[in-house]
Image (cartoon, rainbow, N blue to C red):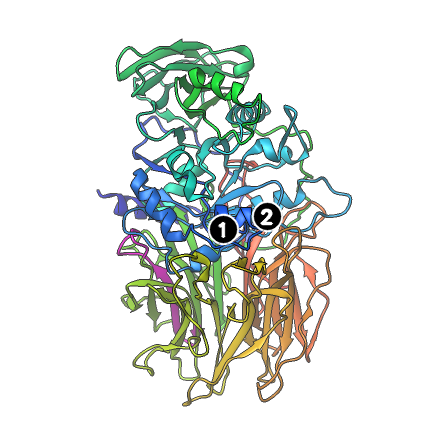
Amino acid sequence: MNRTIRGLLLGLGLVLASCSRSDLEGAAAPQPQPPLPPTAPEGSWLAGDLHVHDDHSSDGSLLRQLGDDKGPGNVSVADQIGQAVLTGLDFLPLTDHRTYDQHYDPLWESGDLLLIPGEEANGSPHATVHGATDTIVQGAQPEGQPEFVPLQWSIWDAHSQGAVWITAHPDDGEFDDGQPNARASAQGVDLVEAWNRASSPDVEIDYAENRWNAGFRFGINGASDDHFRELWIYAGPGRPTTSVFSADRSERALLQALWSGRTRISDAGLSPQLTLEADLQGDEVYEAIAGDEAIAPAGRKGKLRITVRNGLGARVMLYQSPGRSAGPLQTFQPASLNQTYTVDIEVGAEPTWYRLEARGIGLPSAINTGLLPGGLIPLLTEIPDTLLSAISPIFISTAPVSAQPEIPLPADAGGDDGALLALGAAGQFGGFPDLAVSQGKTHLVAELHEAAATRVVYRRRSGNAWSAPVSLAPDSASARFPRVAARGNDVWVVWQDEMAGQQPRRPAIRLRHSTDGGSSWQPAQTLRAIDGRAERPDLALDAQGHPLVAWQEIRAQQPFDIWAQLVGVDTEPRNLTREGKTVRAALLIDSRSALYPASVRPRVAARGDGLLAVSWQDNRTDPDPLWTGQTGSGEGTDPDNWQIQVATRPAGGDWGAALSVGSDERADRHPAIAFNGDGRLVLAWDSKELHSSGANTEVLAVVSDAALGAFGEPAPIAAGPAMSQYPELGAAPDGSVRAAWYDSRAADWRWRVMTARLVSGVWGEAKLINSRGVNTWPATDGGAIAFASTRNAARLQRDRTQQVYLLQAP
């Protein structure tokens, strides 16, 4: 049975398992995590670098840093990708500071390695985030709260998107004079940089051991943290290399391996390659590898297996907790290029961990910029004892371990919100739900993750009964971001899919139709597939039931634009955003001279008389779109001055010119759109000041005039201070419009869904839904709200349980 079919059957089994009678009565009870199966993990090691910059960073390029950001840029997206290919890497994220703009650059393209979304988030301390859908915003520090609260928000925000959150260079952020500071109490970190080329790996390893001894469970990674092409030979992409034991060569498999900490670090070239495995079953099957948590009863005897490749001349140290402070448990000196060792161990009553590192003669493991008198001596003394490689620990305990931070998180203050479990099982990620209510039926779609796969799943609720869940793209392991619309018995679902593979990234827009209220489905059709990326679709149905589909797409040497097609009416899609854009490729002497203003994240709505509307975010009015400044003038906007734009099309007519709302002094992003009972257009979005970090987002809204030719002044729906983001709008049966978003104002710091109604042109009081767990990504229609929730996660680290719930709105 091939991997795709096996994964599908497993995933549908998990979904069906979540659909017990208890679902109709409310939330399911938490389920304990099962022990590791007694089988050896399957996969291969993929080499990459999890921390690389280009000129989309505010401090990219040497001449820019030396010239107060007024110099030209010489590190383009293509430059870093090309260098990673030359280094022999298999995957690469570009982790520019507090921005997602690098992914809107047409140079973000490669057929030679797997590109995954990345960002270096937060102002202080820094973190790299991989696999998120947009920038992770670090909000303002709440008054009177511990310093790590915004950090905790960002970890939960990343996890709500299925992304990986990594502590960057902890010696500059979480570790002061050998002691963890308040920021080190944040929980849920997936990996920690234990070897950043621009800082001190010894201090970073000390920090990691300190946290492991306090019950934190995460793997380690390396980071070139490269900003300069001038340092490529020593500190370019892959120097050092982070290798990941991944089930296959896909974004989802790679992210899942990073979540599990299945990582090792080595310098490029012929550095030692380490593997660490454990057999706690006594059957000679090594069922746990580096990064895993192995659960076994006290007194159980087992073995570690250590394999060293290219280890001749190196010293390999096996450490057991508490780590280097107690010295190595054993030291090995390989006498050949490839050598294997076994070590007998016994499970104790207290949790423990084992890890490896290799040292020997080599170039210094970190850049020493202080080569002044006296600075050269420590540089030279490091050469005989240079860190050459390291690998994540294997954690062994009698039960899953919870972190014991210096400052604990507040207890979950949520209560029973009456929501029904709709999709997802214990240990499974479910997110990005959408719903449509028609003729008393609620049609729900969401993204569910399985081993090395993302699925688009549909489910229907009618009265008090659920239908069986249906995977709408069973032939794909990369279906994402579904949206649903319904009118009578016609139900349409659209999503993006990478059935052609992810190297290069070629997402296409796929569409599926049911004519009997979701009971059966016609074959999926590919609406848009290009030599580029077609992404993030949305849809609504016109008065005749035709689906209006809009999406963002990009091709080589072109910017991201919004395209729309009324399926069954239009023979071809229409580009709604190219008119009025100035586009140019970069000059050879300055990467930042490129001009590719982006139009992204479309949302659509349809009025009863057939009038259609599409909204999106657009940065064409920014002084330097996608950049944080330009040559000669220095620093510019950071983030960009994104605006919300909207275009309408009357029944039987053509698209009109776009209107723009928002402020030149703010980043306005993530629009939502709906018509109210009077036929006026309502827009909502999240907005923040032009500060890259330390500023909250708030949800703003406007209502059009009767002719849809102008909008009022944007105003917040709910007063702060709080982080409020990713709003959605939905019409209610009484003609009002409901807004829903996720918000940080709860006393226990957890993200919760907040909602408000627009009645007779006035927003009512916003209400925070007091749900248990972290609750995000709401969607609303017809008086119902669907959202993602972690309420059934058994612990705050390494439990990926996030499920989709359905609630009748308060």
Q: Earlier in the sequence, mark 1 or mark 2?
A: 1
Q: Is residue 115 visible?
A: no
Q: Secondary structure at mark 2?
A: loop
The quadrant the N terminus occupies is top left
Relative horizontal placement of residue 44, taking residue 714 as reference (left or right): left
Q: Are marks 1 and 2 in contact (CB under 8 Å)?
A: no
Q: Residue furthest left?
A: 1
For disc 1, the marked residue is: 161
Q: Which residues are magenta?
A: 486-505
Badge 2 density bin: few <14, some 14–19, many ≥20, Cα 10 Å: many
Instruction: Assess whether residue 490 is covered by the magenta stretch.
Output: yes
Q: Is residue 300 above or below residue 159?
A: above
Q: Amino acid at mark 2?
A: Val
Is residue 747 found inside the magenta-colored segment of the image? no
Residue at mark 1 to residue at mark 2: CA–CA distance: 12 Å
Question: Could you say where residue 778 lies in the image, as x and y percent from the top left?
Answer: 55, 59
- x 48%, y 41%: residue: 800
Q: Which residue is mark 2?
A: 774
Q: Residue furthest toward the front?
A: 373
Where does the C terminus fall, quadrant-wise? bottom right
Tag 1: amino acid:
Gln
Toward the viewer: 264 or 19? Answer: 264
